[in-house]
Amino acid sequence: KLEGINKYFGPTHANKNISFTLKKGEVRGLAGENGSGKSTLASIIAGINKRDSGIMYKDGKEYDPSSPQDAARNKIGIVVQELGLVNRLPAYINVYLGRTKEFTKYGLVDLKGINDAVNEQLKKWNLGTIRLKSLAEELSVESRKVVELARALSIDPDILILDEVSQALTHDKRVILHEIVHKFKEMGRSVIIISHDVEELLELTDTITVLRDGEMVGTKDTKDLTSEMVKSLMIGRDIEKDYYRSDKESVYENEVVLEIKDLSVENELFDI
């Protein structure tokens, strides 16, 4: 539960007096245009940013995380919109970064134990295989997102926050992500999903909260909403024809401006 949350970045009032409740087992969508304050609100819940005023409660007790690690100890996990790994560390270390004490005995870190634990998380949530010993920067964007998801899931969270995760995933991995959301709901755990894909929100969520210019427009049951209604709430007016700008008809010529022949990258691309 959040009451009267405000956050400023210099003169920008990113969150304006936000009051927000999330129920056990609820899947809540956060919708809004870029700059509406969705990610800021998520970051405050997850201990990444500190609120400037207002109060938060978790399970009826006041909740004031000092860091993402503190939020994790309170069983709140997040996958952020930006790429959130340390590039020069192996993928498996990134999953338990800040929590390696769990694998430390007599001052020595059990690296194999960490790697095995990450593999167990990938298997548990059907996330597939990843080159865990590779540096994070050597992985594809999708693989890096899966590593971040494994990190969030590894704390066994009561609340999972997904900030624009689907956009970095292929269709197959999206399906797996949606299965995880459904499983969380079955387990009586809660999920907050931020997505520009309104259809995805309508498919996955129980309720949708719309933010506009840092303010809460309102929260409605998903079953009572249509795509057009959500978009209308997001931009503050009725939608006429296309929501997105329609480009003029494309005109192209036969002159070649870019050509690629026999392009190969080791273990990645072959004779493109």
Image (cartoon, rainbow, N blue to C red):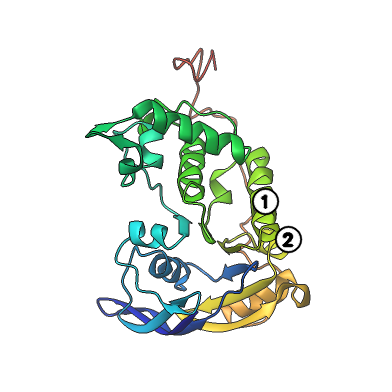
Q: Position of residue 155 (x, y in %)?
A: 46, 51
Which quadrant would residue 245 be assigned to in this image? bottom right
Front-most of residues 38 and 27: 27
- Residue 203, disc: 2
Label of residue 178 in the image:
1
Q: Can residue 239 be seen?
A: no
- Regarding mark 1 in the picture, which secondary structure is present there? helix
Is 254 on the left or on the right of 102, as rendered? right
Q: Amino acid at mark 2?
A: Glu
The span from disc 2 to disc 1 (Cα, nearest Å) is: 9 Å
- Above or below, 111 relative to 42: above
On the image, the x and y values in percent for residue 56 come to 42, 79
Residue type beneath disc 1: His
Task: Answer with mark 2 or mark 1, whichever residue precedes in sequence.
Answer: 1
Q: Is residue 242 left or right of residue 85?
A: right
Q: Which residue occupies the foreground of this view, 59 or 2? A: 59
For label 2, the SS is helix
Q: Residue at x 51, y 15 (%)?
A: 261
Residue depicted at x 65% and y 78% = 232
In the rendered view, would you say 125 is above or below 246?
Answer: above
